[in-house]
Amino acid sequence: QVQLIESGGGLVQPGGSLRLSCAASGRSISHYAMGWFRQAPGKERELVATIAGSADVTHYSDSLKGRFAISRDNAKNTLYLQMNSLISEDTAVYYCAAKFTSSTRVLVTAPNAFNYWGQGTQVTVSS
């Protein structure tokens, strides 16, 4: 079992930046593929980015690549999402997710494949 707690959300002006954190407890995340998803009001949950146990294997939503960067610090048992050049359409609840993988190079992208989820953190981009 692994518990995930997101933090770092809040209100930011368009063009601003935020860094979200996902602190994991209960297990080391070294062998967990992890990801960030978001859900805006009235919208389906969508992929933001995912990362394998080894940080060199990543996948981004095409629309977000270049503005967002997913990273992890396994020593700190923490996943991060750096969000830059934020726009109003980025407003959503952002969720951290994890899935155990025997290989640290396996990338998980399907949201229903992740079996551990955080409670979410609200990101609001507004003037």
Image (spheres, grey):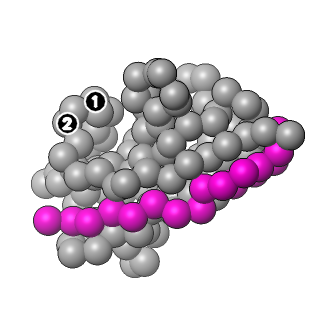
| Image-based side of 69 in relation to 38, left or right | right
Vertical arrangement, residue 9 with respect to residue 109, above or below: below
Q: Nearer the viewer, residue 1 or 30?
A: 1
Looking at the rendered structure, which numbered label has been put on residue 110? 1
Examine the image and state in which quarter residue 29 appears.
Answer: bottom left
Please say whether residue 109 is one of the residues in the magenta stretch: no
Q: Report the residue at 51% width, 28% height from top.
A: 41
Q: Position of residue 65 (x, y in %)?
A: 61, 32
Residue 15 covered by magenta stretch: yes
Q: Residue at x 64, y 34 (%)?
A: 90
Please name the amino acid that badge 2 sits on.
Ala
| Residue 60 visible, this orientation | no
Q: Name the amino acid, label 1.
A: Ala
Contact between marks 2 and 1 (CB within 8 A): the answer is: yes
Classify the position of the C terminus by image quarter.
top right
**In the rendered image, which quarter contains the N terminus?**
bottom left
- Magenta residue span: 1-18
Q: Is residue 54 visible?
A: yes
Q: Is residue 80 left or right of residue 29?
A: right
Q: In the image, is residue 61 above or below residue 33?
A: above
Q: Secondary structure at mark 1?
A: loop
Q: Quadrant of residue 59?
A: top left
Q: Nearer the viewer, residue 3 or 98?
A: 3
- In terms of secondary structure, where does tag 2 sit? helix
Q: Which residue is drawn at the image coordinates 61% and 23% (left, top)?
A: 63
- Left or right of 60 on screen, residue 97: left
Q: Give percent across and percent down for residue 9.
A: 60, 56
Q: Label 1: how many residues lie within 10 Å, few (<14), some (14-19) or many (20+)?
A: few
> Could you say which quadrant of the image residue 58 lies in?
top left
Residue at 62% in and 46% down: 123
Q: Residues within 10 Å of mark 2 (few under 14, many from 20)?
A: few
Residue at the spot of label 2 = 113
